[in-house]
Amino acid sequence: MLLSLTLSSFYHHSRCSSSSSICTAFSLLRLSLLRRTMATSATEPASPSNTRVGWIGTGVMGRSMCGHLIKAGYTVTVFNRTLSKAYPLVNLGAKLADSPHAVASQSDVIFSIVGFPSDVRSVLVDPTYGALSALRPGGVLVDMTTSDPSLAVEIAAAASAKGCSAIDAPVSGGDRGAQNGTLAIFTGGDEEVVHRLNPLFALMGKVNYMGGPGKGQYAKLANQITIASTMVGLVEGIVYAFKAGLDVGLYLDAISTGAAGSKSLDLYGSRIMRRDFDPGFFVNHFVKDLGICLKECQSMGLALPGLALAQQLYVSLKAHGEGNLGTQALILALERLNNVSLGVLSTST
């Protein structure tokens, strides 16, 4: 509004000048004011009044995460390859775009949470299709996909070359964390930019600044290594308790408040007992994550045998056509190894 009034006043003040002079001066003033507006918005904390949000990827996690921003009053433009998966957000008030490029043309901060590093590269830095190609100077890319740290560094450099910023911000907490706004968010990049985006991150969970570009991805990979071995321990304990003749429900209740208690137990123990293998996080995506971990270990000269074992067990699920199940389906691999079937152990919620 201020920009429009200033330009209008300038035009009327200058109407007696030559047409070409007016056009030149008008353009210079417009550019000056635009730069001033952009500089101000680039330092203020994000809010519905100064930040238009773009969202790419509206799957199990992204749909809930983006929903929190819409409900908080942000203007949001969304894109998903399968358009029908974006409709619940459109019903909440989001605008639907037909490409990442189109999302960026209407956004100041763009979040992405997609499947694989190749998808990240496509939606963010593809020269014609990607979001960066249409992002104005001062804009920010925030990738929340678990991806290669080296790709995060590459995206940050590409964004910087355009006068923009990029933050890697993968998350942990599964579908429940996304729904409840309680995710752990691991961020890498410019700390001042992360601080400016804190009002957005706070709607989705707790932000943890880990360092420069790529450090958020490294933190998430370390998180996945921990989860992988924890899940193996959880399902092995369940199989052992079952074979020992214990009431598995009582067993899980008993260990939940002891040293063996964990988020994995809280999130997946009852689901395993009910044979509920709906994905809070896909086996296919976990195989991808653990594969990235192993690749990074090789470059670091690290031997992590627990990680390697867990990755092989999850690959076996994928080989049996179970890649679209949730990670709690690991129990199926242990059942096959031991020629047992636990069946439905509980119908309680």
Image (spheres, grey):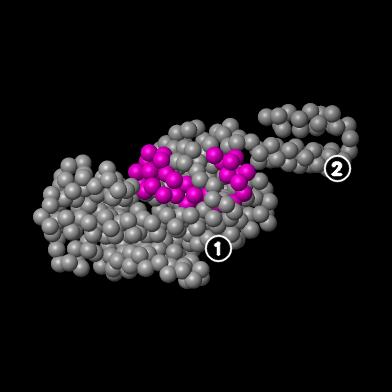
Q: Quadrant of the C terminus?
A: top left
Looking at the image, is 345 positioned above or below residue 334? above
Is 222 in front, or is 55?
A: 222
- Image-quadrant location for residue 33: top right
Looking at the image, is 303 positioned above or below residue 244? below
Secondary structure of residue under mark 2: helix
Q: Is 212 displayed left or right of 36 in the figure?
A: left
Is 198 in front, or is 96?
A: 198
- Label 2 vs label 1, nearer the camera: 1
Say which residue appears at 58% left-offset and 37% top-offset: 46
Q: Is 47 displayed left or right of 177 in the figure?
A: right
Q: Mark 2 points at which residue?
A: 20
Asked if residue 181 is among those painted magenta in the image, a careful observer would answer yes
Say which residue appears at 50% left-offset and 43% top-offset: 207
Q: Can residue 332 be seen in this view?
A: yes
Secondary structure of residue under mark 1: helix
Residue 159 position within the rendered picture, expressed as x and y whole percent measured from the top left: 63, 54
Residue 54 position within the rendered picture, expressed as x and y whole percent measured from the top left: 53, 45
- Image-quadrant location for residue 106: top right
Asked if residue 26 is among those painted magenta in the image, a careful observer would answer no
The amino acid marked with disc number 1 is Ser
Residue 105 position within the rendered picture, expressed as x and y whole percent measured from the top left: 59, 47
Res. 150 mark: 1
Numbered range of the magenta stretch: 169-198
